[in-house]
């Protein structure tokens, strides 16, 4: 297998197939957004395309455009839901670029003035906390879709 081949058994592909659980906050026929189980901030969401793509280097431009539209929508909802002062949006490519899961994904991290991001320790968040944040974000996104 080449260094840039897509692995259909990566954790995000398994989430898309329903083989692994995720706290979903937004879904269309093109994208899925769900809570990061090792959040660096309360309300940390991942947005992924449903298309099989390793990273920005191999994703089809139309799928990237769908992903970008979803990231913007989810980011607005996360900022509103979490009463954040701002956002950090991150996307990593290949191991040297910091990518760990090799299915393209975008991190949406709510930020508050004077509050640093937590270090990436590999510690998993309490599932009840993730469920609460997911419900809050889903409600904000639903309100936005309804014009509120």
Image (tube, rainbow, N blue to C red):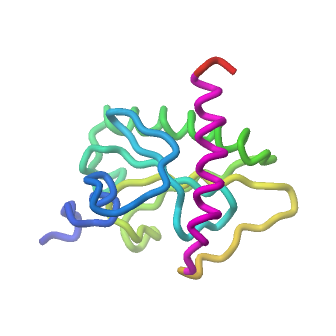
Q: Where residue 95 appears, x then y in whole percent?
A: 38, 73
Q: Where residue 94 appears, x then y in whole percent?
A: 36, 67
Q: Quadrant of residue 72?
A: top right
Q: Where residue 86 appears, x then y in whole percent?
A: 76, 47
- In depth, the one of 47 and 56 nearer the eye is 47
Please identify the residue farthest to the top as the structure is shown. Answer: 147
- In depth, the one of 40 and 23 nearer the eye is 23
Does the magenta portion include 136?
A: yes
Q: Main secondary structure of the magenta part?
A: helix
Does the magenta portion include 111?
A: no
- In depth, the one of 81 and 70 nearer the eye is 81
Quadrant of the rendering where the C terminus is positioned: top right
Q: Residue at x 66, y 53 (%)?
A: 88
Task: Please give left or right for residue 121 compared with residue 87 in the image.
Answer: left
Task: Please give left or right for residue 91 compared with residue 14 in the image.
Answer: right
Q: Residue at x 41, y 44 (%)?
A: 32
Q: Which residues are magenta?
A: 123-145
Residue 124 to residue 21: above or below: below
Task: Please give left or right for residue 113 compared with residue 56 in the image.
Answer: right
Task: Please give left or right for residue 26 compared with residue 140 in the image.
Answer: left
């Amino acid at each position: 297998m080449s260094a840039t081949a897509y692995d259909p058994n990566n954790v995000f592909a398994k989430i898309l197939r329903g083989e692994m659980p995720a706290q979903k906050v937004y879904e269309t026929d093109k994208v899925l957004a769900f809570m990061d189980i090792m959040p660096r901030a309360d309300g940390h969401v991942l947005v992924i395309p449903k298309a099989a793509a390793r990273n920005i280097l191999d994703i089809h431009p139309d799928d990237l455009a769908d992903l970008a539209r979803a990231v913007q929508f989810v980011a607005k909802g996360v900022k509103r839901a979490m009463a954040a002062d701002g956002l950090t949006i991150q996307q990593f490519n290949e191991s040297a670029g910091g990518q760990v899961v090799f299915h393209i994904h975008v991190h949406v991290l709510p930020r508050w003035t004077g509050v640093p991001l937590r270090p990436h320790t590999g510690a998993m968040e309490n599932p009840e906390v993730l469920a609460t944040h997911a419900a809050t974000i889903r409600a904000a996104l639903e309100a936005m879709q309804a014009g509120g």
